[in-house]
Image (cartoon, rainbow, N blue to C red):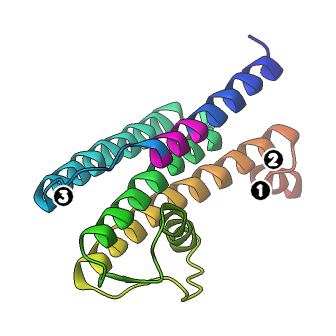
Amino acid sequence: MTKKHSLGVEVLYNAATLAGALLAYYFFPLSGESSALWQVFLFGVGLGLLIWWVIRELMKQLAAGSSGVRVRSLVTLLYPLVALFAMAYYLIQRNDPTQFDGLVTRTDSLYFTVITLGTIGYGDVHAVGQFARVVTMIQVALDLVVIGAFVAIASSRVQVLLAQRGTGPEKAADKDS
């Protein structure tokens, strides 16, 4: 498979993952009264699966070494992460309207999740209750792990590309000798 073809497949996979996460988020039925305990359990299962996926992806990246690093595979992890936390925030607010200020709709919840991911925090929607704050802190911790891995892999990839072109720090040191 050529590099161009491989890139096209990765872009399609990335777009499909984003579309799937958004469709699941907006169209997952939430009618009916399910217990808060059941919702916490399902969030825990989803969180466990995401943590497993993040660890699996990081292990693949480490096993691939510097020649096999792929930043796009980590970007794909952000979509289900955002969808899971947006759904959690929406359900938290639906079960206890005192947990958030300014969060009413699914779009408000998605907005809050993305703004939290970007560490911007406009303040128009924010966690007020203790449970909402704990879940938000968990999201921030996971976001930092994924973004940190993203930066590490991207910088590793840049170093490999510079070394291949003969402009990396190793090559510059060789030329000075």
On screen, residue 15 versus residue 90, left or right, reads: right
Q: Quadrant of residue 96?
A: bottom left
| Residue 36 on image: x %, y % | 15, 61
Residue 110 shows in the view: yes
Closer-to-camera residue (117/159): 117
Q: Which residue is mark 2?
A: 162
User: Nearer the observer, disc 2 or disc 1?
Assistant: 2
- The residue sitting at the top extreme is 1
Q: Residue at x 36, y 73 (%)?
A: 136
**Disc 3: which residue:** 40
Residue 43: x and y, percent?
A: 25, 53
Q: Which residue is mark 1?
A: 169
The residues tagged by marks 2 and 1 sit, at their Cα atoms, a distance apart of 8 Å
Crowd tier of the residue under label 2, counting other residues whose Cα lies within 10 Å: few below 14, some 14–19, many 20 or above: some
> Is residue 174 placed above or below 90 in the rendered structure?
above
Which image quarter is the C terminus in?
bottom right
